[in-house]
Image: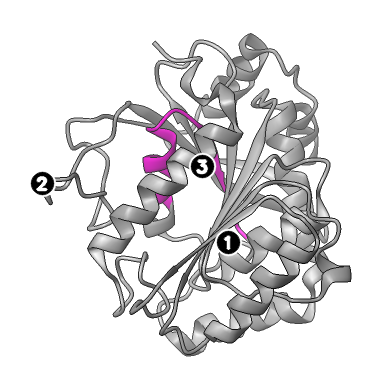
Amino acid sequence: MRNNFTRRTTASITLSCALIAIVACTQGDDSATVRNNAGQIPRNDASPLNDAGERTGSQLSVVAETLAYAEVDDQLVKGHFVFPQNMVETLPAIILVHEWWGLNDEIRILADRIAAEGFVVLAVDLYGGRSAKTSPDARKLMQEIVENPESAAENLRQACDWVSSTAGATQVGVVGYGLGGGWSLNAAMALPDKLDAAVMFYGQVSDDEQELAPLDAPLLGFFGAADVSIPLDAVNNFELALQNLDKAFEIEIYPDARGGFASPRNRNFDADLEAQSWRKMLEFLRENLRESEQGTV
């Protein structure tokens, strides 16, 4: 297992070698799947809305597989790796960080949706293969990260290295929801030389200017003014600190939105706001990861 991991992470960054490495990982494993824009991607209400209020399908067919991307605390870490099926040259990569539930099917579907827009996506796993179905279980898993943030940070660092080396990405962004939103910000602060864009859907924020100072990547944040877990005052102070530091950022605050408004399984889900924020996120990623419209046919 360790030798296989080493070979994968030291593969050439050229597209041909990257694809050879990916294909080699699938031999003898039926976990790789091709998902198309005709409805064959398993999906739920996470599908975006168009201007007519209709659910839309993915733009591109994608190929997805479970692959090892890191080794943390002597344990191999596997994530959901997905890329456009018609990829002909390297594309920017997105590191997708899950909510407090863990790397579940909803996050995998979300990764597929982002990849279908012309990105390579790695949905990481901060819980070591575990996920939660109840709030108490999710809280326990989240607490492990709170108590050992160094492991989560190392996980994300290796994820960035993996998409750069094995998948050949020359630009890397990070996107996170809830718990993942906070870790999107954490990653952008901790890995300023590895990340080119960061998006956070809610998630914990900071107004500590010394802590925020290393942030270099452009940041887009979405928050709800009625979110009881992330008070509006905290978001406003966060925004003020970013202004004082002259950082490149944009904060969207939806007046009546509660926490989880962009997560379909959350009781506070708002389909209109999800669609608005989805479109804005894609615009932001394409603007800051400018190769995203190249590399597919």
Instruction: Say if mark 1 contacts mark 3, CB within 8 Å.
Output: no
Between discs 1 and 3, the one toward the N terminus: 1
Q: Position of residue 226 (x, y in %)?
A: 41, 85
Looking at the image, which is closer to me, 295 or 100?
295
The Cα atoms of the two marked residues, 1 and 3, are separated by 31 Å
- Per the image, the residue denoted by label 1 is 129
Outermost residue toward the right? Answer: 210
Between discs 1 and 2, the one toward the N terminus: 2
Judge whether 53 appears above or below 237 on screen: above
Instruction: Say if mark 1 contacts mark 2, CB within 8 Å.
Output: no
Residue shown at 62% from the left, 13% from the top: 15
Q: Position of residue 91 (x, y in %)?
A: 57, 23
Label 3: state its secondary structure: helix
The Cα atoms of the two marked residues, 3 and 2, are separated by 23 Å
- Per the image, the residue denoted by label 2 is 52
Q: Describe the colour scheme in one phrase.
A: one colour
**Residue 284 image label:** 3
